[in-house]
């Protein structure tokens, strides 16, 4: 999972490449590089670290100057982050390329190439493709690409410069995403739309094993046989502002504030005559009526959205739901029966494990329903049914608004399921749907209400080595996400625990001063949760309680209380998510971390 870009046009290529790479740094940021045709030669600049380190290096050593080139921002998989392992990689004199993905058979290929006398500079799988392509190239780029693709296994998107084809940039993909942007007198390749949105909102989606040729004559497409392909031009419905920070200090904060709009944009078109309506997404009451087993498969935050879905669907529709981590699901020989529903949730739509899990489910005869944010992504394209979330681009690695829209869809589905199964009547479904439509307003208010408290309280978390999140029912499902949010950006260890389970072992971790974040929004479970809070308090924990404004709690139950508005009990996670996001955000800020690009992570995990 890296970001690749390419440019052919009249502008200063290095400037465009660096600018485009900045929008892709969420895909990886441990090294970066560009290659540009300069006076008939390919000039490469690459450096370990952030894009700014590359920019500094180019200031010192010279910026490649030209109008055609490729660029790369890396999240290391094969070989440590270093200038040598950074892309672009040259395969010899003839080929220089950038790569996103994994070459699975790189070891075998490398051995073969070494036996042919080829010498490798880096530890990367990418250099193997570069060397192989260079070896296969005899003046015909398409023939060389075809021959090379027949030998490599894995996932890849490649941007390729052939040294003797100075006016041309080639691109090809298998599995990994790649778009080809078309502006006025200029063309681009990119791993994702935000990279090019400043220049154009028009683009083509490159499909598996399709080749794009970009030159001053524009762009053309062909298959591996060289046969021309006509493709449909797409128009991105994002603008540049949507992909930039808009005055906020960090993308994460901006995205937290975008949640009310994101939820509104996601649910409004899916409500008709006051009832959830997902027919346009291929989901009808008829389809749902016959489903007796649901699996929700996803990774990270998306999986946590699935946990909320499980509680909601099981409670309202009385259909069993198994939530599975995609990387476990795909290898544990899941017991899927024909007709089961497998729901895949993914912001990026490109997460390798989630995609593979979905393919497996399809193969086993399940109906697949994808809930995806990135339009035209692989998961979106391959699912039987598809509900797009309309969060807009999410740039911060820590997911916030994508989670919020994912759970809003879980509610729509839960209400519809319950109606289809006859577990609630139309009037009840309308009542719940109406409350869901009021959530954006409540969200707006909650963000403003709790922001200051969260910033203040976060200061008490800064020195913690470890902390616990506890809750019951939906509060426990939400706690999982709260805990992940905190650890990924603050680097403080935390764990989410079902409050009632603590006394079976984990309570022994509680020591004087250890912070415990208790979520208690489920009024029906309140007394039990309060008892569990008292258990940790009695053992010295510093308790931060998230609860609604109407709950009466004794003043000695918690050290700090964050109050949110009270709405329908089952919808409370949508509001309670906000303080958990803001606590994580401010803790990260106060610890001086890079909030939007936490260490070791990348936004889109397109490798296993
Ligand atoms: C959460 O903040 C993370 N960025 C991560 O857990 C993410 O949700 C996970 O990698 C799944 O990504 P996806 O939604 O794009 O499939």
Image (spheres, rainbow, N blue to C red):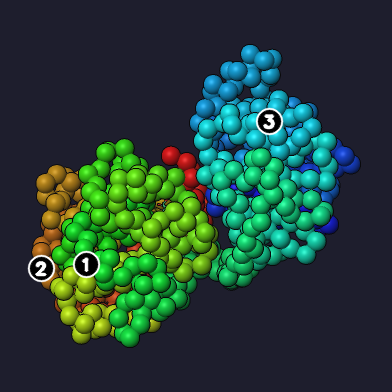
| Residue 42 image position (x, y, % from top left) | 80, 38
Q: Mark 3 vs mark 1: give the one in front.
A: 1
The residue at 25%/55% (across/down) is 339
Q: Which mark is residue 527?
A: 2
Q: Residue 532, image x and y in percent?
A: 13, 59
Left or right of 535, for residue 251: right
Q: Are marks 3 and 1 in contact (CB under 8 Å)?
A: no
Say which quadrant the C terminus sits in.
top left
SS at mark 3 in the image: helix
Res. 337 mark: none
Any part of residue 160 in sight: yes
Q: Residues within 10 Å of mark 3 (few under 14, many from 20)?
A: many
**How far separated are the C-alphas under marks 3 and 2?**
67 Å
Instruction: Say which mark, if any, is on residue 289.
Output: 1
Q: Residue at x 15, y 73 (%)?
A: 423
* Horizontal side of residue 525 vs 306, given as left or right: left
Residue shown at the point (79%, 45%) measured from the top left? 168
Q: Which residue is mark 3?
A: 133
Q: Is residue 530 visible?
A: no
Nearest to N terminus: mark 1 or mark 2: 1
Marks 1/2: CA–CA distance: 36 Å
- Residue at x 38% of width, y 76% of height: 270
Camera-nearest residue between 586 and 225:
225
How far apart, in angstroms, are the residues tagged by discs 3 and 1? 53 Å
Q: Is residue 13 above or below residue 277?
A: above
Q: Does 267 sit above or below residue 377? A: below
> Residue 452: percent from the left, percent from the top?
40, 72
In the rendered view, tell whether residue 86 sits above or below residue 363.
Answer: above
Query: Label 1 neighbourhood size at 10 Å, few (<14), some (14-19), many (20+)?
Result: some
Q: Earlier in the sequence, mark 3 or mark 1?
A: 3
């Amino acid at each position: 999972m890296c970001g690749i870009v390419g440019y052919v046009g009249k502008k200063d290529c290095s400037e465009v490449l660096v600018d485009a790479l900045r929008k892709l740094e969420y895909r990886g940021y441990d090294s970066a590089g560009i290659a540009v045709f300069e006076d008939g030669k390919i000039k490469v600049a690459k450096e370990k670290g952030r894009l700014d380190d590359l920019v500094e290096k180019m200031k010192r050593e010279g910026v490649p100057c030209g109008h055609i080139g490729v660029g790369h921002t890396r999240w290391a998989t094969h070989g440590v982050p270093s200038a040598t392992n950074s892309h672009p990689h040259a395969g010899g004199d003839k080929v220089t390329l950038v790569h996103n993905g994994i070459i699975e058979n790189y070891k075998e290929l490398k051995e073969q190439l070494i036996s042919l006398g080829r010498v490798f500079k880096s530890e990367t799988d990418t250099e193997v493709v570069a060397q192989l392509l260079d070896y296969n190239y005899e003046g015909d780029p398409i023939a060389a690409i075809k021959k090379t693709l027949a030998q490599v296994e894995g996932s890849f998107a490649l941007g390729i410069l052939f040294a003797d084809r100075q006016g041309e940039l080639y691109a090809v993909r298998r599995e990994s995403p790649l778009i080809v942007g078309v502006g006025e007198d200029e063309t681009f390749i990119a791993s994702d739309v935000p990279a090019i949105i400043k220049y154009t909102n028009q683009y083509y989606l490159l499909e598996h094993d399709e080749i794009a040729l970009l030159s001053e004559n524009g762009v053309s497409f062909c298959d591996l046989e060289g046969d021309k392909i006509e493709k449909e031009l797409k128009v991105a419905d994002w603008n540049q502002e949507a992909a930039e920070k808009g005055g906020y200090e960090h993308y994460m904060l901006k995205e937290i504030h975008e949640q009310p709009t994101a939820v509104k944009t996601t649910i409004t078109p899916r409500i008709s005559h006051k009832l959830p309506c997902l027919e346009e997404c291929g989901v009808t009451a008829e389809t749902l009526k016959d489903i007796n087993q649901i699996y929700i498969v996803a990774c990270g935050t998306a999986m946590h959205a699935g946990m909320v879905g499980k509680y909601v669907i099981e409670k309202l529709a009385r259909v069993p739901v198994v939530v599975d981590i995609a990387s476990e699901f795909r290898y544990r020989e899941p017991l899927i029966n024909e007709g089961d529903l497998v729901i895949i949730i993914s912001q990026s739509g490109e997460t390798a494990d989630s995609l593979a899990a979905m393919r497996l489910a399809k193969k086993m005869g399940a109906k697949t329903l994808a809930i995806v944010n990135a339009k035209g992504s692989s998961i979106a394209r391959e699912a039987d049914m598809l509900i797009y979330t309309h969060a807009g681009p999410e740039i911060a690695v820590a997911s916030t608004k994508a989670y919020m829209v994912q759970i809003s869809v879980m509610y729509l589905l839960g209400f519809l399921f319950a109606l289809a199964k006859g577990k609630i009547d139309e009037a009840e479904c309308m009542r719940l749907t109406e409350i869901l439509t009021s959530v954006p307003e409540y969200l707006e208010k909650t963000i403003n209400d709790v922001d200051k408290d969260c910033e203040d309280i976060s200061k008490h978390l800064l020195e913690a080595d470890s902390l616990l999140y506890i809750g019951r029912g939906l509060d426990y499902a939400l706690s999982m996400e709260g805990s992940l949010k905190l650890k990924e950006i603050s680097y403080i260890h935390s764990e989410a625990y079902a409050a009632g389970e603590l006394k079976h072992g984990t309570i022994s971790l509680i020591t004087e001063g250890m912070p415990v974040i208790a979520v208690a929004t489920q009024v029906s479970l309140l007394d039990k949760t309060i008892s569990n809070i008292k258990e940790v308090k009695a053992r010295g924990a510093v308790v931060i309680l998230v609860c609604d404004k109407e709950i009466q709690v004794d003043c000695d139950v918690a050290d700090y209380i964050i109050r949110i508005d009270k709405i329908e009990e089952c919808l409370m996670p949508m509001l309670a998510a906000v303080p958990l996001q803001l606590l994580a955000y401010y803790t990260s800020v106060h610890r001086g971390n890079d909030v939007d690009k936490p260490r070791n992570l990348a936004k889109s995990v397109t490798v296993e």
